[in-house]
Image (cartoon, coloured by chain):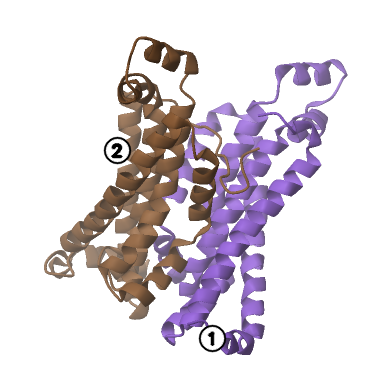
Amino acid sequence: MIRWDVISGNLPLIGQKLVEHVLLTVTAVGIGLVLSFLAVLAIRRWRGLAGPITGIAGVIYTIPSLALLAFLVPITHLSFTTAEIALVGYTLLILIRNLLAGLDAVPLDALEAADAMGYGSTRRLWQVELPLALPVIAAGVRIAVVTTIGLVMVTAMIGEGGLGQVMLRGYNFRNDTLVLTGFVLTVALGIGADLALSWASRRITPWAAGRN
Amino acid sequence: MELVTSVVAWFTDPANWSGSNGVPTRIWEHVVLSGIAMAIALAIGLPAGLAIGHTGRWVRVSTAVAGLGRAVPSYALLILSVGYLGLGFASALPALVVLAVPPILVNTSTAIRDVDRDIVEAGRAMGMSGVTVLREVEIPPALPVMAAGVRVATLQVIATATLAALVAGGGLGRYIVDGFALQEYERMVAGALLVGGLALLTERAFTIIARRRGEPRNVAWTPAIGGAE
């Protein structure tokens, strides 16, 4: 049922869509991470913002992707921007939650030691707190990446979608091979990205090994 | 502004509130589809999660399977299902069930696993059978985490049931897909507002129940595929 000639004939298309898929995902998680980090900095400065910020991120996360895209199209039209606004929106709750949880879990001893050594609050954040929070933050990034890889598919509806386009094309032309290729590649991309990030996270935080 | 007026006009037009394409019918379809998917997912996820948590067997296998389930995009599974089940309601079910089982399964099994082993042993020592231990000792403290899993699953199913419209199922997604195809933005936005509203209402309902029961919130999420750190 798989026709290899269809795959080889469409190889340039598949490759291009795979690259687009990765690009859409990386851009979304990258922007999401920056925004979430800024939000977390604001929350640390003004504790009262924690409720409203996670609340708003939670509301965005709850909105169905197709609905959010439909809502954005009249405003930002069929574009990369529309896809990214939605994709970034969905990463916020995951990233903010894990950034907060990771930073909150930094041992008090480490903070006091840094203070006693005369670290200012900025230096303490970058050199003590963030490195110690890294495993939890990385866990959030992994979930955000896998979730986004799945959500990118839906943006095929507005003409983006990376591998979603491959599946959609297969669907429209009743081409099972293309449908299956898009499916298998997306799942493989999700699993591959998660395993790679898990490996990378363990490599850059060797001190966290064996802790659980 | 023009769009806002036309969306308001859409909502106040009585024609959109009756018949097979009316709002009540579409909401009902959406709820029924989500309900059936959740019933199947609960029938799979709960017993499996309880058994795995109680016996401590198959933990790694279930985590791997659940992780795989999370990596499968619903949209992709939906389109794949059409090839085998044809256009219609049934094609939406596999995607929704695959989406809902992992959170139910993982939360149930880990919550049961995390119950203090000393208490479980005490229950056994008192002569409780396996099922009694599960019912009387293990499930009560595990309930909040199990409920959190069901909540996540329900919300994801409601959100994703919107995609059912792409494979010719009914539900609120119909307005979005049809509005998009016909370039009737007011219909599309109305659909988006209705699904968003339904999802948010469900979320509120779960939050209120959880608060009544005095359950904690805000825990870090852990990945499922490559294993948690």
Q: Nearer the viewer, mark 2 or mark 1?
A: 1
In three-dimensional space, the C-alpha distance between marks 2 and 1, rounded to whole angstroms, equals 49 Å
Where A177 falls versus A135 (above or below)?
below
Which secondary structure lies at badge 2? helix
Judged left or right of residue A77, residue B185 is left
- Whether label 2 touches label 1, CB < 8 Å: no
Amino acid, disc 1: Arg
Residue at screen point 46% across, 50% down: A60
Residue at screen point 30% across, 76% down: B87
Tags 2 and 1 on a common chain? no
Amino acid, disc 2: Ala
Q: Position of residue A61 (x, y in %)?
A: 46, 49
Q: Position of residue A105 (x, y in %)?
A: 65, 26
Q: Which mark is residue A140?
A: none
Which secondary structure lies at badge 1? loop
Quadrant in which the C terminus of chain B appears? top right
Can you identify the residue that label 2 sits on? B205
Chain for colour purple: A
- Colour assigned to chain B in the rendering is brown
Residue at screen point 29% across, 51% down: B40
Q: Position of residue A63 (x, y in %)?
A: 41, 53
Is residue A198 at least partly visible in the picture? yes
Q: Which mark is residue A3?
A: 1
Q: Chain of mark 1?
A: A
Alpha-carbon neighbours of circle 1 within 10 Å: few (<14), some, or many (≥20)? Answer: few
Is residue B148 at least partly visible in the picture? no
Between A101 and A174, which is closer to the camera in this rendering? A174
Judged left or right of residue A147, residue B3 is left
Where A17 falls versus B120 (above or below)?
below
